[in-house]
Amino acid sequence: MGLLVDGQWQDKWYDTDASGGRFEREDAGFRNWVTTDGSAGPTGKGGFKAEANRYHLYVSLACPWAHRTTIYRKLKGLEDIISMSVVHPFMGDKGWTFAEGKGVIADPIVHARYLYEVYTAAKSDYTGRVTVPILWDKKTNTIVSNESSEIIRMFNSAFDEVGATTSNFIPPELLAEIDDINTFVYSAVNNGVYKAGFATTQEAYEQPLTTLFDALDTLEARLAKRRYLMGDTITEADWRLFTTLVRFDAVYVGHFKCNIRRIIDYPNLWGYLRDLYQVPGIADTVNMNHIKQHYYTSHANINPTRIIPVGPELDFTTAHNREQL
Ligand SMILES: N[C@@H](CCC(=O)N[C@@H](CS)C(=O)NCC(=O)O)C(=O)O
């Protein structure tokens, strides 16, 4: 684990001393948008027109943020339009790598051995963390975006005229409500598990933990009468919650000490998780080996023996009966 400073790799863990033991996530550095006509998006600069075979996605199958983008690549039919590389699940002192391993897909663009080389190929003096996902432009040889929430908004519609399916996970009339629930789920749940897991003082761990389980209780109640967060149709808000829920019992309960309750203890959340998992194509995007291997072996200060727990037994394929809601 480390970061780039003026284009040089430095092996450093998160600096929680500066924030009273609390984990604070850095904002993503590349914030441009692919658009249908190449005009600038809400942030960054223009010049990134949606075209088939122009863009390349770098992901980790372990990472919940990158997982959002592989879900959209699958559901929007972008697999033949946007190529993809997959890093090795072990993130060591050089960060993410393309070391050989099951499920790893080497980098045919920059031919990087270490993911940081993709960042320095885009900006030779880059300063910041080296994170997945990354959306790369093969035409101008640079990074379009390394912010998953924005990459999935591009995938949702920008490629519709160049071969993507026309499914839309942000119906315009639901946008404001989706944004609200995303903000709540991001802070309390998606990032909440990290705030608890990477905390280095008791207080910095307990506070986000309480918020996390209060939020799960709220979501459990919301899902008692609605099949999905917004009602009858799956929206972006569901996919953003899904990537945390699917990792929860296998990783966050043990490794990040988010152990007041498990997802299987929540009847509605557990049914909802299986419902989403069973959407055609989604199971292919979930690699539990990469997920467990990454977390339990990469954070030596949390799990110094690097032993990967064998359990829990989880079956995401059993009947959920939520179509009755
Ligand atoms: N804001 C980013 C966060 C991505 C992120 O933090 N990815 C993690 C993997 S789960 C990562 O690559 N971390 C490496 C590091 O922080 O050094 C996004 O949502 O795209």
Image: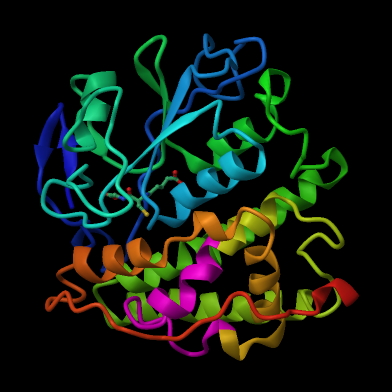
Residue 140 coordinates in the image, percent (x, y): 39, 9
Magenta stretch: includes residue 249:
yes
Q: Is residue 19 above or below residue 43?
A: below
Residue 323 coordinates in the image, percent (x, y): 85, 72
Relative horizontal placement of residue 199, taking residue 188 as reference (left or right)? left
| Residue range of the region highlighted in magenta in the rendering | 243-263
Q: Is residue 155 above or below residue 312?
A: above
Q: Nearer the viewer, residue 144 or 323?
A: 323
Q: Looking at the image, which residue is at 38% across and 73% down?
A: 196
Relative horizontal placement of residue 8, taking residue 122 as reference (left or right)? left
Q: Nearer the viewer, residue 184 or 81?
A: 81
Residue 138 coordinates in the image, percent (x, y): 40, 16
> The C terminus appears in which quarter of the rendering?
bottom right
Relative horizontal placement of residue 106, taking residue 82 as reference (left or right)? left
Q: Quadrant of residue 58?
A: top left
Relative horizontal placement of residue 105, taking residue 287 as reference (left or right)? left
Q: Quadrant of residue 245?
A: bottom right
Q: Nearer the viewer, residue 217 or 121?
A: 121
Q: Looking at the image, which residue is at 57% across and 48% down?
A: 71
Q: Is residue 246 above or below residue 9?
A: below
- Colour theme: rainbow
Q: Looking at the image, which residue is at 37% across and 64% down?
A: 291
Instruction: Note whether residue 187 is visible.
Output: yes
Residue 300 coordinates in the image, percent (x, y): 15, 69
Q: Is residue 314 above or below residue 235?
A: below
Q: Quadrant of residue 292?
A: bottom left
